[in-house]
Amino acid sequence: MFTTEEKIAKDSQYFIYTPTAAAKALFLYPTVIGGFEYQPGYSLERNRYDSYLVILIENGTMEILLDGKYVTAAKGDAIILDCYRPHAYRTSTGCKTIWLHFDGKLAGSYYEYLVRERGNIIALSNFKSSRQVLSKLLDGISQHLSLSEAQMSIMIGNLLLELSLTPSSKDAANEDGIKKVTTFLTENFSKKITLEEMADMAGLSPYHFNRKYKKETGVTPHQFLLSTRISAAKYNLSNSNMTISEIALSCGFIDESAFCYCFKKREGITPNEYRKNAIGSASLS
């Protein structure tokens, strides 16, 4: 369908998709998709349009309203908006775009994650790849190709994945540092490891490392190290004849008492009780 909106090139097209009940229950799905060339002076303000919106800027600039101020997205950027809430965008320069309104059970979770991690305007390191995914979906719908709703859901998921995997070079370096520390902890959990040593390995201050680690993994580095030690202890309790004291020291605890206290606090039972339960279960299987 050709648009009739003012200040949009008349050869700009959009296509409406009506999902099935199964798609609404199970998948991500498109609702409207199009390619628009906005002319200078175009603006839109809308209280609600039940969907989430991704816009890829192919040329020119577009401004979106965030926290009462207009913020500019330029060529190579992606915009993501929650259209269930009041939203507005405009262009003073004109811009060429390809865009998608989508929804689904997990759409809100994808949106919240992307905005939290990348913001509403995302500078794409691989714009071509993101555009290719969206173009295939647009072509499939506009040409009435035999795309299943599962396939379309995967394509939208791939698009959102492309948006999530475009960190700045600084963020990428930080993420590599977090992965490096996590690998080190997994392989060296029996050793005494200080927060300062972990932070130095990641190239961050202890304060920023602790915050960054929790943001990336959901736990503090101390919590991760402790969980790894407890997991190793549980394996040894179930699969070896090592004494409790030997297990404690081999897993990085300062002594048997500290190990038993920590184990019971986390697992609700003592190491000896865990071992008896594990042996009993094994003998019954």
Image (spheres, helix red, strand yellow):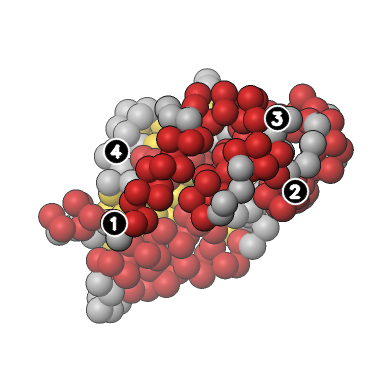
How far is mark 2 from mark 4, CA to CA?
A: 52 Å
Amino acid beneath label 1: Leu
- Which mark is in front, 4 or 1? 1
Q: Position of residue 219 (x, y in %)?
A: 58, 33
- Which mark is in front, 2 or 4? 2
180 displayed left or right of 240: right
- What residue would you read off at disc 3? 255
How far is mark 4 from mark 1, CA to CA?
A: 58 Å
Q: Position of residue 182 (x, y in %)?
A: 69, 47
Seen at 28% across and 67% down, the residue is: 150
- Which mark is in front, 3 or 2? 3
Q: Residues within 10 Å of mark 2 (few under 14, many from 20)?
A: some
Residue 255 in view of the camera: yes
Which numbered circle lies on residue 188? 2
Seen at 69% across and 33% down, the residue is: 253
Location of the N terminus by quadrant is bottom left
Q: Residues within 10 Å of mark 3 (few under 14, many from 20)?
A: some
Seen at 49% across and 27% down, the residue is: 264
Relative depth, front residue between 3 and 80 = 80
How far is mark 3 from mark 1, CA to CA?
A: 33 Å
- Which structural element holds mark 1? helix
Location of the C terminus by quadrant is bottom left
- What residue would you read off at disc 4? 49
Relative depth, front residue between 127 and 245 = 245
Amino acid beneath label 2: Asn
Q: Position of residue 11 (x, y in %)?
A: 40, 64
- Which structural element holds mark 4? loop
Residue 79 in view of the camera: no
The earlier-in-sequence mark between 4 and 3 is 4
Which numbered circle lies on residue 284? 1
